[in-house]
Amino acid sequence: MPLQSKPLPAETADALHQATGLRARAVPMCTLHPAESSKDTCVVEAKSEADVIAVLAYAHERSLTVLPFGSGRHLAYGPPAEVPDIALMLRPMNRVTSFSPGDLVVSAEPGITLAELAAVLSEKGLMLPYDPPVPAAATLGGLLSAGLSGPRRALYGSLRDLAISLRVALADGRVIRTGAKVVKNVAGYDMTKLFIGARGTLGVVTEITLKLRPLPMHRETVLVRGSAVALAELRSCIAQSTLVPSRLEMVWHADLGTDFVLAVDCDEPKPSAKAQTDAIRAMSRDLGLAMDVVEGEDADAWWSDLSRRLAERRVCIRLQGPPTSLLAAMPRAVEAASALAEQTEGVTASAGGLTGVARIAFDPARAMLDRPAPLGAIADLAASASLDMVVERAPAEVRAKHQPTLAPAALALMQRLKSTFDPDNLLSPGRFWGGM
């Protein structure tokens, strides 16, 4: 029996609307994100978990592929993938579904943005200690799908550590819950972590439960300027001390001139923050380094500016490895990125002195995009320093040329997970490494 051709996006939109009553329309994928294909797809908006279930059940019955997304920003992350039959927009699902300030726990839908969630939490003096290098308009579901983390991982952990429970709609429309809505939950295997960073290939997350922290009573950031070698030595002194920074990043961008800056943040009450600052001042003085201190809103503005610089560029490379190796490689990494950038002034680099995660962001020169391996210089540097490199964000043609090689055992395990949760390969096909 010959295979039936799939309906056109406009036909899918009409049929989906008639079957579910949900608003659906055919649009080019490039309208969802400029880095994606111009081929049309059927876009449907989900306003509730019931809508998600209805769309997945409809798609499962007809063997149609589904791509969940929020604002569309994270479509430029990870491998370039197939254009789906249905793009499921979750941005309208932006409610806080439950909030227990006394228990330091909140549950929210995936379409809520970081800014919207922060506004709710701050009214009760709480925060989600999570600062990935993205705009405040990024959705929680998109960030969970991409598995991003930020400098605050040094103290609070990544989103994998902060998320304690999920509600997930599987490819056939069934709903499961992972974890529990309590902070202390150690029974059994933690399935929550399976879906974080899976890029929507295992299920559609419809609710996220997170553990919170009180807003800092005082914010104080020490900024130490100097050469990368001297700052790496200072970083070692801090790491071997009793100090507990909430963030520790070695940063470079054109506004800093030839110097790097080691930024050390503290979320402790003012007396403790002052004690940490005094300790770092003494260490810096011994190494002949100059330092400044910014507090309160000025400190928040400094970190926000760094996040903006990393988020607004078209290419973002992530390097990972031991902090000492990572910081030692940063001058050469900045030099390599500057040679590939449209403008050297647009290059920003930030390396975690405790997390072992660095990002280098820039806008690529047009000539670079046509090369067989556009980011070959940075890839060679990462290999020589025994660092892992991931093209976190880039135009599709660049991502296609720099796919990471997965170990056979790891690839086989991931393929088994994919076949268990989505045997027909209908969810976000090609969005995960290895073509899954």
Image (cartoon, grey):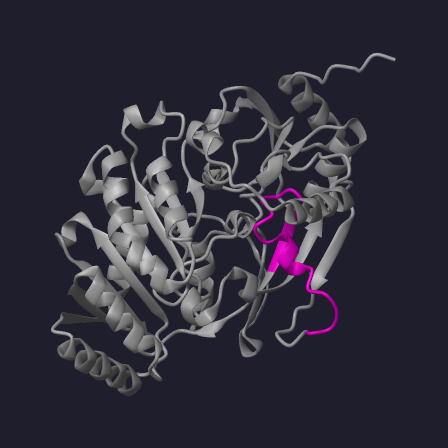
Q: Is residue 394 visible?
A: yes
State which region is magenta. Answer: 186-208
Q: Judge whether residue 39 is colored magenta.
A: no
Most extreme residue toward the top is 2
Vertical side of 292 occupied by 356: above or below: above
Q: Is 146 in front, or is 69?
A: 146
Q: Is residue 263 left or right of residue 142?
A: left
Q: Position of residue 261 (x, y in %)?
A: 21, 62
Q: Residue at x 23, y 40 (%)?
A: 338
Magenta: main secondary structure equals loop
Task: Give coordinates of residue 396: x percent, y percent.
Answer: 45, 29
Residue 193 in the magenta stretch? The answer is yes
The quarter of the rendered structure image containing the C terminus is top right
Residue 203 visible from this viewpoint: no
Quadrant of res 42: top right
Q: Nearer the viewer, residue 354 or 345?
A: 354
